[in-house]
């Protein structure tokens, strides 16, 4: 069996991407560009292939939030993105012009996650969840309307993360539950983990979902019945939202931790596997940032093995398997 390709080297380092922590960073659908959002209330656009400009400035800066940016998602056609943050607002943006196209403000607390949904390539619906324990759906085709078209209020505490695929919407909450809504069938399944859920990632075939919790554990759950398929430990995540991701054709789970490390696990065995050019203290983890790694994501581009990390140190990095 050929071992999976994993990040070995820092391909690009955006050393002063934001002033303060970077809470979220997303590849576009081609893996060519990156959007990042941070404590400085800004969203910035970067080139993932060429790296930082000589003066370190981004391609574009988007400014409308009055408080920190916590959530981003990019439409499938890459023409728009949605952002949310501590100012309770959800903004729809035009990527090229930097114009705010829509604003939704039905939430009464900070927005922790936002996602495009719907059958159209550009995403006809936006899903948002946050501190007020509700998941809300906004129809972008309803011109002039700002009220949500649907609200899910089963959570007993803040919504920290959302994952959407087709008719399935999954939410992770501080109440320790992963809730899976089948919107077509009108059904809800609740999987109780008993620890705050801070990250959710669906597999490409929707057969499993990766849930990260504040007991320093990632869990792989079966989407059909919520049963535990595998668990992954050995990192430190007890206080912050450290987003995890699948990588290497979903043979590996990757994430950062609160010690600034980049970590990887084999999906089948659950064991940690070496990542980075120089593992930390001879172990399987790699010291990637000076502070907590808050977001880790693999490029969605086919055949691309680049990995993105964003940290509380304000630094954004692109990692490559190439030497």
Image: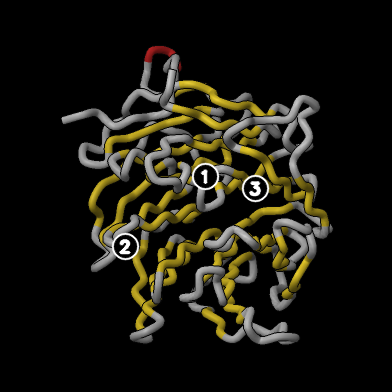
- The x, y position of residue 208, in whole percent, is 29, 58
What residue did someone put label 3 on?
35
- Please tell me whether residue 229 is drawn above or below residue 293 in the rendered image: below
**Secondary structure under the numbered disc 1 in the rendered image:** loop
- The x, y position of residue 272, in whole percent, is 32, 30
State the count of labels: 3
Q: Are marks 2 and 3 in contact (CB under 8 Å)?
A: no
Residue drawn at x 64%, y 65% is 131
Number of residues whose C-alpha sits closer than 10 Å to that of mark 3, classed few (under 14), some (14–19) or many (20 or more): many
Q: Which image quadrant is residue 49 in?
A: top right
Q: Are marks 2 and 1 in contact (CB under 8 Å)?
A: no
Q: Which image quadrant is residue 270 in?
A: top left
- Please tell me whether residue 28 is drawn above or below residue 290 in the rendered image: below
Of badges 2 and 1, the one in the foreground is 1
Q: Quadrant of the N terminus?
A: top left
Specify the label residue 206 is tagged with: 2
Residue drawn at x 60%, y 27% is 12
What residue did someone put label 1 on?
31
């Amino acid at each position: 069996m050929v071992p999976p390709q994993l990040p070995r080297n820092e391909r690009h380092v955006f050393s002063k991407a934001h002033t303060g922590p970077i809470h979220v960073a997303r590849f576009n659908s081609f893996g060519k560009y990156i959007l990042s959002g941070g404590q400085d209330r800004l969203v910035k656009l970067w080139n993932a292939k060429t790296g930082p400009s000589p003066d370190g400035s981004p391609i574009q800066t988007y400014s409308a939030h009055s408080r920190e940016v916590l959530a981003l998602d990019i439409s499938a056609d890459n023409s728009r993105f949605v952002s949310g943050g501590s100012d309770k607002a959800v903004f729809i943006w035009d990527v090229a012009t930097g114009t705010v196209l829509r604003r939704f403000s039905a939430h009464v607390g900070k927005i922790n996650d936002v996602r495009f949904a719907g059958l159209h390539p550009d995403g006809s619906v936006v899903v948002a969840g946050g501190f007020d324990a509700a998941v809300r759906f906004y129809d972008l085709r309803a011109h002039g309307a700002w009220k949500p078209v649907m609200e899910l209020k089963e959570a007993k505490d803040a919504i920290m993360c959302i994952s959407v695929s087709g008719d399935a919407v999954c939410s992770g909450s501080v109440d320790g539950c992963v809730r899976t809504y089948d919107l077509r069938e009108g059904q809800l399944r609740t999987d109780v983990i008993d620890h705050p859920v801070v990250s959710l990632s669906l597999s490409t075939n929707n057969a499993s979902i990766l849930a990260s919790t504040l007991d320093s554990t990632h869990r792989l759950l079966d989407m059909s019945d919520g049963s535990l398929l595998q668990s992954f430990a050995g990192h430190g995540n007890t206080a912050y939202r450290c987003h995890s991701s699948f990588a290497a054709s979903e043979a590996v789970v990757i994430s950062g931790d609160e010690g600034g490390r980049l970590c990887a696990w084999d999906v089948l065995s659950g064991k940690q596997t070496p990542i980075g050019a120089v593992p930390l203290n001879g172990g399987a983890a790699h010291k990637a940032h000076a502070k907590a790694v808050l977001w880790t994501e693999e490029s969605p581009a086919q055949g691309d093995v680049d990995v993105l990390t964003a940290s509380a140190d304000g630094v954004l990095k692109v990692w490559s398997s190439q030497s």
